[in-house]
Amino acid sequence: MKIILTGDRPTGKLHLGHYVGSLRERVKLQNSNEFDEIYIMIADAQALTDHAGTPATVRENILNVALDYLGVGLDPNKVTLFIQSQIPALFELTAYYMNLVTVSRLERNPTVKAEIAQKNFETSIPAGFLCYPISQAADITAFDATCVPVGEDQTPMLEQTREIVRKFNDLYGNGENILVEPDIFLPTSNVCRRLPGLDGKAKMSKTLGNCIYLSDDSDTLAKKVQTMYTDPTHIKVTDPGHIEGNVVFTYLDAFCDDVATVNEMKEHYQRGGLGDVKVKKFLLNVLEETLKPIRERRKQYENDPAAVMKILQEGTIKANDKASTVLARVKKAMKINYFE
Ligand code: ATP
Ligand code: MG
């Protein structure tokens, strides 16, 4: 069986980083018809690990994320879209897996470490936040996922999951693999694995506020492209420019299929004589071409939120059936199925 599980936190609308890091790949995988099952989760319980005080934000963004999914072309007839908090099996699995992981192992997770610093948790880290990699292991294994298409920041989570799977199978498998070890699926291009923000920071992220959202209208998009970080030493058009760390060129690598033209522009820019305004105008056209159909498809669904919620509800029922079956298998292996 080939099974996909992936998802996003409903902490805001989805942005171009999500698109190149994961969404675009998901749509390709969906349309490849190579997978037996595809589960896509709106991770509201995970969002609450750092948004416990603002549950309304999480609630509101469930619809936003679902609209973004449908906008990019995820097809509810081919993929199961569901809401994490409504699947009790995920929390039971998390509780059992917590006994297989040490606190110091969690503290060593580089992504979690970076997020703790970014959120100024310092010594008051919510226990749920520290443990979210364990809950991700539950999410992935509850669906027997073999493939997890995500951005590079998720690599440590997949490593943690694989460790839990191996430990579980060793302890409780009796020679059998009760849990499935998943593979991470990263975009082939480095640029897409971690798209930088508009400001040149390493990662476009909702938390950092340096995003172009999939739902931004043409005017907002144009304004954001204008503010993009380029090369601060490229002052006069005739000056030779740098393309390293120049976000405009990074985005062209991520979004423009016409590689020959982009390479020509890079050479011209480095030689001098090509102005930022021109490159940005070219990029704006490329981005508008990508975003226009997404925006339009999203709009159609925006007019019928009840239909979108129905899609989520039906998906959640299906996901719940699957996760319950896997949980029963886990409990049997752990010999905690007393009344069977
Ligand atoms: P938050 O700030 O709430 O954590 P986020 O912008 O980091 O939001 P997530 O919901 O944590 O987004 O990430 C969802 C998916 O999108 C993950 O697979 C993640 O790897 C991917 N992703 C997020 N940002 C980027 C980015 N800038 N480049 C590539 N992939 C990304
Ligand atoms: Mg994140």
Image (tube, rainbow, N blue to C red):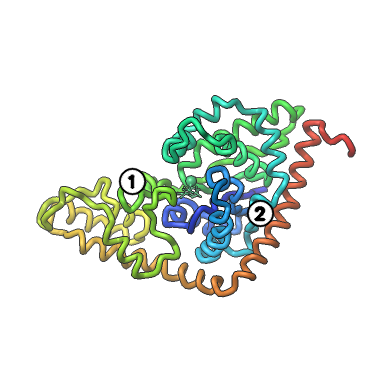
The residue that disc 1 covers is: 201
Question: Height in image: 107 above or below 253?
Answer: above
Residue that lies at the very extreme toward the front in this rendered image? 53
**Place of residue 225 in the rendered image (x, y in percent of width and height, measured from the top left):** 30, 61
- 81 lies left or right of 73: right
Residue 262: quarter of image:
bottom left
Q: Earlier in the sequence, mark 2 or mark 1?
A: 2
Q: Is residue 196 visible?
A: yes
Residue 91: quarter of image:
top right
Kind of residue at disc 1: Lys
Q: Are marks 2 and 1 in contact (CB under 8 Å)?
A: no
The residue that disc 2 covers is: 37
Residue nearest the observer in this picture, 278 or 29: 278
Q: Is residue 148 visible?
A: no
Residue nearest the observer in this picture, 77 or 221: 221
Q: Is mark 1 within 8 Å of ligand 1?
A: no
